[in-house]
Image: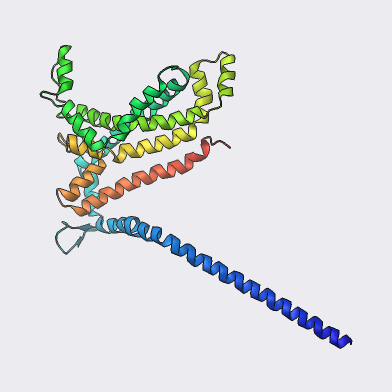
Amino acid sequence: MAEKELRKQAQKEERAAAKKEKKIVTKAMRKRRDGLLFALLLSPAIIFFVVFVIYPVLYNVYLSFHEWNMVSPNKKFVGIKNYENLFKDGEFIQSVGTTFKYIGICLITIFVFPYFLSYAMVHLIDKGQETYRSVLFFPSLISLSVGAIVFQFLFRGIGGPINAMLAWFGVEKISWLNDGPTAILVIAFVATWKTFGYNMLIFLGAILEVPTELIEAAKLENASKWKIFWRIVLPLTSSTAFYAFVITFTYGLGQVFTPTNILTSGGPTNSTSNLVYTIYEAAFFTFQSGRAAATALVTLAIVMVVVVLYQALEKKVHYAN
């Protein structure tokens, strides 16, 4: 009798072990199936990323060590000669300096100005806020190329409307696009005109999220508008401001290409050429693909420095909750 009970108990344990093993196998098969399904769903994005991002970057690195006119089937390996020639070239150094001029102007006109204007629209202006927002945001809906063509007409040296208006006040004709300093300002102005409203809406959204209780409490303590901005609004919107700062930096680095190409083509005497336009000119005008690739990697290095700084400084900004 005892032996029969022991046999039943053993059979029961065997069935339980088999059931548990089957369950483990089924769970492993389910995980494997889910993994394959996940890989299948993700594969289009991975393929797209590899083909259009990873491969071009790696091929660009390869080209930067070669001389190639984009026509010949042969590429001549030159090592780091392209990089050496870049940093010995005065025009390249000038384009780097001009690029940072664009960035500096954009940080003032597209970052600082809309920040303060957004604060003014929320806490200082009582009427017409919707009208101001619509008017300032409208240029963001227009193509940058179209805007650049319009401003090319407005700032034309001979017969341009801007010079005609200045003549009413006795100001002599200004060659806006034929003089380096004024041409840089015009290009930066076009970029500002296009992006100002977008950044302003970003700041408006952040400032409107600041708790009104804090603002009202500060007003009861007779805090000035400046102190309210500096002590309350700025810290609580620092994450948005930091994001807008990085976006504005990258915008000044690359997006001024379009107005530069349309308004001045990098002239006069390379005074308005930026890094991105230098890449375009080297690749498609002089067919120096190695030089263009090296310039592109230098530009990428600048962007990577900004990304590293972003990661380092991100922890110091305020994020709600």
Q: Which residue is at 11% across, 23% downward?
A: 159
Q: Is residue 20 left or right of residue 78?
A: right
Q: Which residue is at 41% across, 62% downward?
A: 43
Name the spot of residue 301 as percent of width and height, x first: 34, 47
- Give whichever of 105, 144 is nearer the camera: 144
The answer to whether any part of residue 38 appears in the image is yes
Image quadrant holding the C terminus, namely: top right
Q: How is the image coloured?
A: rainbow
Name the spot of residue 193 as percent of width and height, x first: 29, 29
The answer to whether any part of residue 105 appears in the image is no
Q: Which residue is at 59% across, 23% downward?
A: 213
Q: Residue furthest right?
A: 1
Image quadrant holding the N terminus, namely: bottom right
Q: Is residue 247 left or right of residue 98?
A: right
Q: Which residue is at 59% across, 14% downward?
A: 220
Q: Residue furthest top?
A: 169
Task: Answer above or below: position of 214 versus 191.
Answer: above
